Image (cartoon, grey):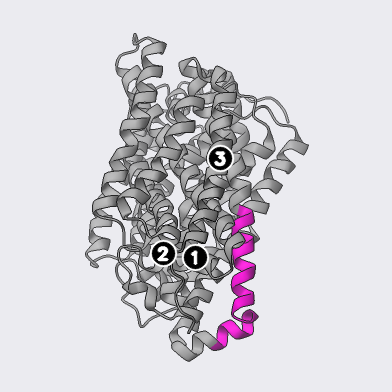
Amino acid sequence: MLPLPEPNTASALWSIAGIALLLAICGYIGFLVKNKATTFEGYLVGERNIGPVITGAAVAAGYLSGWAALGMMGVTYTVGWSGMWFAGIWTIFGIVPCVLFVARKFSFYSRRFQAQTVGDVLGIRFDSKTVQITAGIVMIVLMFIYSIGQLKAAAVCWYAVTGFSPFFCLLLSIIVVIIYMVIGGYTGTQWAMGIQGFLVGAACLALGLWALYLVGGAGGLSKLLLAQDANLMALMRPDLPQVGNTQLFSSMVGITSTFFLFITMATGFPHVTARFLGMRELSRNDYVKLMLTVFLIAGIPIFLNAVSGLSARAVWGAQLLDIAPWKADLAAPFMAMSGGLPLTSLYITGLFSAALSSLAAMILGIAGSVTRDVIQMIRPKTSPSTLLLLTRILIIVVIFIPFYWTLVAPPPLLAAWMAQAAIGMGGIFIWVIAGSLYWKRATATGAMLCMIYGIIAVLTGSVLVSQNTLGMGTLMYIVLIGCGIFYIGGSLLTAPPPKEKIEQFFTMPAE
């Protein structure tokens, strides 16, 4: 086995230089577009004129997050090839339906109805403030949980190369986000995420190719894993408990659930679908560019991430599991450090980008939901200038909540923790967002019942998963199927929406 990389001055300086350059670019973008964020609406959605390439890169960055750029490697490092179902195979399948079926409609509704948040679109669709407020609250809760994973991902990369304490690693991470978000709002965040998206794709591609080279290709990887434990080569691990997080790798229930998790979560991620709110109207050629951009970033490079985790297990064995609190999530940073200074700097900067792009999208979404979907709905006479000031203040306040949580109780396995929030967002909003954009018969009652059931089910189920009395795959089916029953049943058992209003909402220009 190779010795574990250790923090050193050269690695720290190279990584700090890469992140400093990223910060400088993102900060410059924030100042460059600050005139587009001087009003409340402009702060939340910009001028609705962002093109397909930046939108596609921002969507990919928000979708992949610290989960893909760090958490996936931790999963395959821990359980071997059986983790690939959860950590790589289905990744691209989730983002494609989101781009194909949600992008155009969200962009159109944003322009036509002046929608400023995802909850806003739902409030307009159902002509219901109650739906909008409820959607905003549910999104806030689930995005809080998911944002904790982003902070851990950013902090892990700082720890790997500098050896700094968790407190300073986390603090440095959130400072970067605050700077360009408070200044540039949606437009600054979207452009920063777009740049970060390309950086993530390049970093993951380089890391994956280096990891395969280090172990001698696919053949060498297999030999090294077999020498440690034949179970690491299995596509399903019945030797692992079939409850808790490990059900995703140990049974058909868990493995099949990962397909539905990825299919639903991109469309159900409010911080991802919100990337389309500021997009300009696109032609067919523009949509090709949008899809190609997403595929280049979220396709092969991200699949290679999972291979990087396997390679780390092959060369270091199970040593990382003893390094608290980061444990298996150190697999990718250490793999990058084994490749030399340029790869270390590229990957650490890319990982930082992945984690902070999703964190920024979520924090902006949370702050916007509080002010637009809750405060403005309850107190409609609140002035736009007051709402804008509140949103900027909330960004700073809100980000310190996951900061504290991650500091005192970091999740042991990043991807598994984030999956629980993803189950909630995907299981609920695949119906309430995607379903409501296509099913005219859906009613506010159906949407409300779906959201209430979903948030109760995922929060209760997550406790049972953490106690190893329920499998995470089973939780996925409980949330997804249950939400569908309440959404469809509640809609069919209540009066249909007024025909004139629903037709007005669904009427779109011919392609």
Disc on res. 196: none
164, 199: nearer the viewer: 164
Q: Earlier in the sequence, mark 1 or mark 3?
A: 3
Query: Are the two marked residues, 1 and 2, in contact with CB atoms closer than 8 angstroms?
Result: yes
Which residue is tagged 2? 329
Asked if 435 appears above or below 209 in the picture, the reply is above
The magenta-colored residue range is: 201-223
Alpha-carbon span between mark 1 and mark 2: 7 Å
Q: Earlier in the sequence, mark 2 or mark 3?
A: 3
Alpha-carbon span between mark 1 and mark 3: 21 Å
Q: How many marks?
A: 3
Q: Secondary structure at mark 1?
A: helix
Q: Secondary structure at mark 3?
A: helix
- Which residue type does callout 1 highlight? Ala
Please name the residue shown 64% across and 62% down the image: 206
Please name the residue shown 31% across and 32% down the image: 397
Which residue is tagged 3? 193
Q: Secondary structure at mark 2?
A: helix
